[in-house]
Amino acid sequence: MRSSNPVFSRRGFSRDNGYAGFNTAAQAGYAQGNPYAQNPYAQQDVQQGAPPQAPAATGRMTMDDVVMRSAITLGTVAVGAALAWVLLPVSTTSYGLAFGAAIIAMVLALVQSFKRTPSPALILGYAAFEGVFLGVISEMYNSRWSGAPFQAVLGTMAVSAATLLVYKAGWIRVTARYARIGMAIAMAFILVMAVNLLLVAFGVAEDGGLRSFGPLGAIVGIIAIVLGAFFLTLDFKQIEDGIAYGAPRSESWLAAFGLTLTLVWIYVEMLRLVAIFSSND
């Protein structure tokens, strides 16, 4: 499956344009009665006709790998944010550093997105610079809306936990149609936000336009968070399929990368939403 987040497109574990690890050749093989053809990583024992070995015995990705890499990546984001919060007081200079860190993080994320293999150095580099950016903007929001970052963290955790619960309960089935519809909505949202940014930059739209700190901005923020939850379901499905199809252990870094991108998106939107509601109190 090709999972994406609203900012950066990233490939799935199947290394192709197929959905959920099924490429065209695999689908054709399955239709011809070869059940191993559906698994791009499976290696059938032709003589014995045995199924692939368990992931733990063959260096394939496991849930423990995903959890560990995700903890390392998110931990790097947290450390970068904490250091920026402590060492960079709110000022014009810190805003400039935050902008520069965000640009570097974006470049590193894009480079990783187009690489055919995961690079822990790129992923952790992205996490570190993204952490600096988040630390500065979090401190900025906290200086005006005390406690907003903490509430945003709690909100992000709540959205993530609820999404995982709904996904594991089977209330949401991540199918190709589900992914296509969700991606179409996400792309439309991004396009509208890009146009809104241009209108604000040229003075056509005032007070942030659709991203204002009013009721309209709150509605847009809620939509963005729902989109973040949608991308989390794609991430969960991608991880689940990667493990089931025997993806190499190194691919767990991609899973961590994808989850981090999505969680950062949700946190930033949650931070804005908390600020909007606090402003209206």
Image: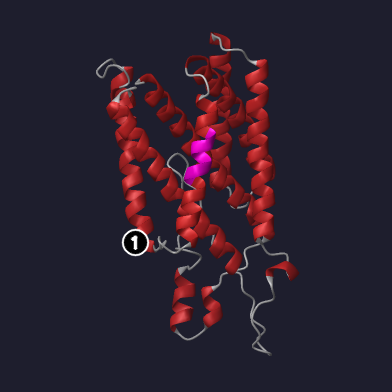
Q: Give the residue type that dot 1 points to.
A: Arg
Magenta region includes residue 223: no
Residue 274: which quarter of the image?
top left
User: Considering only vertical position in the picture, is 23 above or below 235?
Assistant: below
**Which residue shows up at 61% across the image and 35% down it?**
126
Residue situated furthest front in the rendering: 281
> Helix, strand, or loop for circle 1?
helix
Residue that mark 1 sits on = 177
Image position of 165 (left or right of 186): right
**Which residue shows up at 47% across the image and 19% down it?**
145
Residue situated furthest left in the rendering: 204
User: Considering only vertical position in the picture, is 88 above or below 170?
Assistant: above
**Which residue shows up at 38% across the image and 44% down it?**
226
Magenta region includes residue 156: yes
Image position of 3 (left or right of 126): left
Image position of 19 (left or right of 239): left
The front one of 229 and 153 is 153
Please state the horizontal and vertical placement of residue 244, each as a whole percent of the image.
58, 68
Magenta-drawn segment: 153-159
**Which residue shows up at 38% across the image and 26% down it?**
277
Instruction: Decide if residue 2 is in sight here.
Output: no
